[in-house]
Image (tube, rainbow, N blue to C red):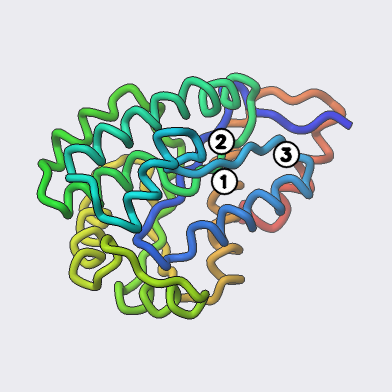
Amino acid sequence: MTSITIPGGLLVAIEGIDGAGKSTLAKGLTERLRAHGVAVSVSKEPTNGPWGTKLRQSAESGRLSPEEEVEYLLADRREHVEQFIRPALQRGEVVILDRYFPSMVAYQGAAGLPVDDLSKANDFAPRPHLMILLDVEPATGLDRIRARGDRPNHFESEDNLARCRQIFLVMSERSKWVIDASKSEADVLEDSYARVVREFAQNVGDLSLENIQKVQSLLVGHLA
């Protein structure tokens, strides 16, 4: 059975501080869209590539300077864009990312690097059609991290997360959509799915006859 695709694809970036629920939402959106026959590719940043692996290791040890983190993040993102993101968009898929370049702007900005310079350094990266910002209080995010059995790393202090949150909130990315992530997991998924569907409907273009019924099923109840 042929999956539904969109000319040029649809790029959805899920952002927010640690503990906001990004991975949970990425999984939920992917499963729900695929259940309706939509072609979806899902990934995360940092990736599991060599640069991303080094970054995750450093998050536990705190060995890298903010400048080194930026260097590694940009190298990781360039590989991600060329090897995964652009090919998936060219295939017409919905691409769902658990973190993207706005996270680098927020986290390295919170470490003291110029936010404008960080934004410009990512000009090579495709802009998301929709940036879902899961907004939550830092204390709530930390409680969730501990509740899942993880120990907060050196990025995950309440003060640092507060600085990151503020940068996210003032970020001028035109596709940004803010949702209250203190709501239940089910409510966040329902609201986010409805928003993704609206973006899908605006970008879907011409469809083959075999996909018309699938799209009607996807859109029902979400475009009122």
Which residue is under mark 3? 38
Relative to 224, does residue 105 appear above or below in the rendering? Answer: above
Q: Which of marks 3 and 1 is nearer the N terminus?
A: 3
Looking at this view, is 4 or 98 the one in front?
A: 98
Which residue is under mark 2? 202
Crowd class of label 2 (few under 14; some 14 to 19; many from 20; radius 10 Å) = few
Q: Which residue is drawn at 74% across and 25% down?
A: 207
The answer to which image quadrant residue 1 occupies is top right
Foreground disc of the pair 2, 3: 3
Q: Residue at x 10, y 50 (%)?
A: 112
- Judged from the image, the secondary structure of the residue bearing numbered disc 1 is helix
Looking at this view, is 221 or 54 the one in front?
A: 54
Alpha-carbon span between mark 3 and mark 1 = 14 Å
Alpha-carbon span between mark 1 and mark 2 = 6 Å
- Judged from the image, the secondary structure of the residue bearing numbered disc 3 is loop
Residue 123, percent across and down? 28, 25
Q: Which of marks 2 and 3 is nearer the N terminus?
A: 3
Of the residues shown, which amino acid type is indicated by label 2?
Answer: Gln
Q: Which residue is drawn at 55% across and 27% down?
A: 84
- CB contact under 8 Å: marks 1 and 2: yes
Of the residues shown, which amino acid type is indicated by label 3?
Answer: Val
Residue 184, percent across and down? 54, 76
Of the residues shown, which amino acid type is indicated by label 1?
Answer: Arg
- CB contact under 8 Å: marks 2 and 3: no
The answer to which image quadrant residue 181 occupies is bottom left
